[in-house]
Amino acid sequence: MSKTQQDEPVGFIVEEARATEFIFASDRKRYPAKFEYLTVNSEELVDRTLKPVEVLAQVERITSQSLALRRSLDIEAIYRIKEAGIDDVKTWGIARVLGYLVPTTKGQPPRILLPRRAVTPGNAIYIAPDSLLAKFYAYPKEESLYVGNLISRPQIPVHLRINGFRRHVAILAQTGAGKSYLTGVLIEELMDRGATVIIIDPHADYVFLSQSLKGDKHGFSDRVTVFQNPESTGRYSKKDIGGVESYTVRLADLDFDELCGICGIGEKYTNIRAGLATALKQLQERNVVYLTEDIEKELNTVANTEDLDKSIRFGALNATKYVRRLHRLRVFSRSGVPIEKIIKPYHSSIIDLSGLGNRSTDYIVSRLLKDVFEAVATDAFAYPVFVVVEEAHTFVPPEFPTYSANIIRRIAQEGRKFGVFLLLISQRPGRIHPDSLSQCNSQIVLKITNPRDQNAIAQSSERLSEDLISDLPGLNVGEAVVVGDITRTPVMIKVRPRNTREGGADIDVVARLKQARKAAGIDAQLVQERKQEKKLKGAFSEV
């Protein structure tokens, strides 16, 4: 027995055992709980030599059963069996093998290998010591993010591997399970390591990242900027947020094909495209920094210029109704925000899209991510960029195209080569395009009860077993399953408390209702009515 193991076994391996899992029988009073960690002694080839190793496993299922106590029995028979002490209760379980530690050179963390040999039936199992678990879920500080603690051992911290983010990450959970809170924790940790973070924030969940829990500044407050489009009504006022920059797109910066794409002018509309091209050329020749209304005026000028070809004049006239679509986006201006202002070393930029329509939001995300990808891919920006996309299902849905779908899918497929890494956040994984979801080699999954969403997660990740999927509905708020390249082995965590203020928390309905009563003067009225009731008590007799 290893010196790190507790003295007394809690069970023994029985029946069939594999390299990936084993069945164990345990005492009915001392059996390990679900999610508990176990160790068992085994042998593995280490440096071509068969050596004793301590294999770590986790309880996936625990079952108590009795051959004597059947549901067909009446309650009196059950009482007699219990009194006679012949209830014959047996406890057994299934444990998933996580791996074993192999020492490395001094100063390097130990390696974790998966066993190639099955553990032997009859071997004793022990409760894993804290010291072993701490080694399993730790990385050197500069290489890791501290996100929480083991659910079954809250004293054991869990760290995620930063290099695992190169293969993209999906954070998935139903509404209210804590996904935005967890994402805030990850952003705090990334900022602490000097990361550049772009946050697509449709509901203003992250606009208070520059504030501490008390509402004042913290260590990297000056490295957080919130951007809003002038047309956004915003969920919170600029005064509440504490400083907001304007985000606009310079209409004149759009190339011709992009402008036609937004307006819905397909390639087959040759006359309309020719009329629009003529109008834009004339504006550019006069050095006009144009807006939508300038394009419309120029189209009218082209349509009424008799020395131009008739097809161009007719095309310009018809182009007017398409160009009016630019008005509905309400994101363009005569000046735009340069990408250098948004992506900076050791800086987080939050793009607050709350209050904007879906088409406007979609276009802003498309334009911004194209600029980010181009800046990093061309070495105009030399550092890694982490792109957080909240409500990812609205930008890359499976059933219809969006402005932003192509660039998000491109980042998912090619971003890791250049240093652009995605964090896709969603409460409806079943509504995310499967190609984008499958490109996320790591998943952090909180509580999910919808079968369609569970199935989408299972199809996108081979590392989530059926047992882990079945555990998702039983997770509490703030608890998550982590799998993939960001962790050595699948792990279940309780997310740590945040250091920054949360923007997306649910409102306190009871407190708000109390405030409403007070504002309406109802509370004072109720006090008076109850005083009156006490005075009248006992004043009436039965008739």
Image (cartoon, rainbow, N blue to C red):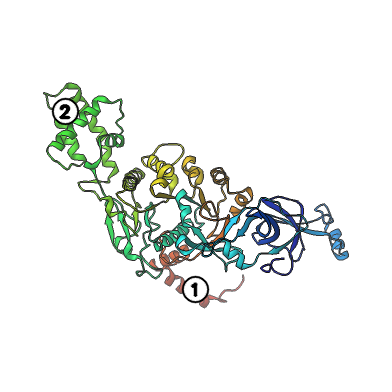
Q: Is residue 279 left or right of residue 375?
A: left
x then y, percent, for residue 411? 40, 44
What residue occupies the far top of the structure in this picture?
310
Q: Where's the C terminus, which quadrant?
A: bottom right
Mark 1, mark 2: which one is toward the viewer?
2
Q: Is 128 on the left-hand or right-hand side of 393?
A: right
Residue 530 numbered mark, or none: 1
What's the amino acid at mark 1? Arg
Q: Quick check: 331 left or right of 396?
A: left
Q: Position of residue 143 (x, y in %)?
A: 46, 60
Q: Which mark is residue 303?
A: 2
**Which class describes the residues within 10 Å of circle 1: few (<14), some (14-19), or many (20+)?**
few
Label 1 sits on a secondary structure element that is helix
Q: Position of residue 58 (x, y in %)?
A: 65, 58
Q: Name the residue type under label 2.
A: Ala
Of the pair 482 and 209, the residue shown nearer to us: 482
Q: Which of the labelled discs sits on residue 232, or is there none?
A: none
Mark sitting earlier along the chain (1/2): 2
The N terminus - image quarter: bottom right
User: Which residue appears at 61% of the width and 67% of the height?
Assistant: 130
Q: Nearer the viewer, residue 493 or 86?
A: 493
Whole-number angstrom distance, CA of label 1 to CA of label 2: 77 Å
Coordinates of residue 294 in the picture (x, y in percent): 17, 39
Q: Disc 1 vs disc 2: Cβ atoms closer than 8 Å? A: no
